[in-house]
Image (tube, helix red, strand yellow):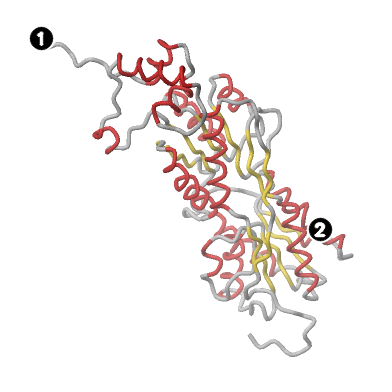
Amino acid sequence: MKPGKPKKSTIYDIASKTGFSASTVSRVLSGSTYPVHEQTRRKILECAQELHYVRSAQRARFGFRDLEIGVILPNISNPFYPQIAMGILSEAKKYNCNVFFCDSFRSEENQREYIRSLLRKKIRGIIISPLFKHFSELELLRKKDVEIVVVDQEIEGISCSQVQFDTVKGGILAVDYLASMGHREIAFLGAPLTRISRREALEGFKIGMMKNSLPVREENVILSDIEEEIGGSYEFENGRILAERFMKLQNRPTAIMAVNDMTAIGIMQWLMLEGRVSIPGQVSIIGFDNVYLSKMVTPPLTTIQQPAYETGKLALKLLMDRINGGGSDVYSISLEPELIIRGTVRDLNNKIEYWR
């Protein structure tokens, strides 16, 4: 019987033999510029040579890396999350790491299973937009020395860096703009308030209404009762459902703030095709996110910019700093909103009849 092939050495073998952490070994062998004591560097390189550690061209060709991370996002049917993913991938190239992407389809159980699966793969870090009401799963990751960066949702009680967006301020900014354009009756349309970002968007809407001395009417806050994928495009289809409910209001507002762009686009489509409503002639709409599709619809959507691509890049950088640096510092970064003016908000201050 032929003897089996000898097992290839890994950075963990080198770490075990030298007594240094796997992150320190990884920094030295990957040629990182992160400062490492020269004596430590020499000892690691000598051990790597002794153990015949080789990062072969064949392994690199097929994408195998010593450093592997996981990314868990709620759903890729909303272009906001693929934009985060692209930001992560663009930055990951600089660190020569392999990225495993997981789509939880808005399911807490799916997200838990992905965490367990990624732990079995012995990944070094996770970027996650959590769906959990409780965060025991993330605590498990930390106990296993897996670094975490949270995006899109704010959490407490877990030692990890977070890249957030000032959603409350974005909601206020949206209402401020609609009010400045002469709108006094404004509706908020959105999905169930199961996520912190949605609750904060509604909070910003209400603060903005009070700030501008506008009435917050209960019937003008229209939220869905269920949240499940509908033909792979939940937000869009949900927008259509919300638009139909909006049209049944006895005293319809002149403007709508949507919880995100895909919901806004679904609202627009139903109002224009099914409701025979002119946008922005009869109803104005402002979205939230500034996904790439928002400038492709007709009329192009006025929205609040949430920099998804930059969020992904920043999250990956923070994760790599923790993995490579091994420091104890964690950061909570809140990105600022920006108003993107396009063509879906009518200026009611202009008394000229709007024909569009």
Q: Nearer the viewer, mark 2 or mark 1?
A: 1
Q: Quadrant of residue 289?
A: bottom right
Residue ID for mark 1? 1
The secondary structure type at the circle numbered 1 is loop
Q: CA distance from mark 2 to mark 1?
A: 78 Å
Judged left or right of residue 110, residue 301 is right
Task: Name the outermost residue toward the front.
Answer: 38
Vertical placement of 211 versus 119: above or below? below
Judged left or right of residue 83, residue 283 is right
- Pinpoint residue 82: horizontal percent, then vertical percent: 49, 51
Q: In terms of depth relative to the viewer, which is nearer, 122 or 263?
A: 122
Task: Name the outermost residue toward the bottom.
Answer: 352
Name which residue type carries label 1: Met
Vertical placement of 9 versus 105: above or below? above
Vertical placement of 39 versus 146: above or below? above
Q: Name the image quarter holding the C terminus.
A: bottom right
Instruction: Identify the mark at residue 218; answer none if there is no mark.
Output: 2
Judged left or right of residue 73, residue 201 is right
Q: Residue at x 22, y 15 (%)?
A: 6
Q: Name the image quarter holding the N terminus.
A: top left
Q: In terms of depth relative to the viewer, which is nearer, 191 or 315?
A: 315
Q: Residue at x 48, y 47 (%)?
A: 85
Label 1 packing within 10 angstroms: few (<14), some (14-19), many (20+):
few
- Pinpoint residue 152: horizontal percent, then vertical percent: 62, 45
Name which residue type carries label 2: Glu
Find out whether the residues at labels 2 and 1 contact each other: C-beta distance under 8 Å: no
Q: Residue at x 71, y 51 (%)?
A: 167
- Pinpoint residue 263: horizontal percent, then vertical percent: 60, 60
Label 2 packing within 10 angstroms: few (<14), some (14-19), many (20+):
few
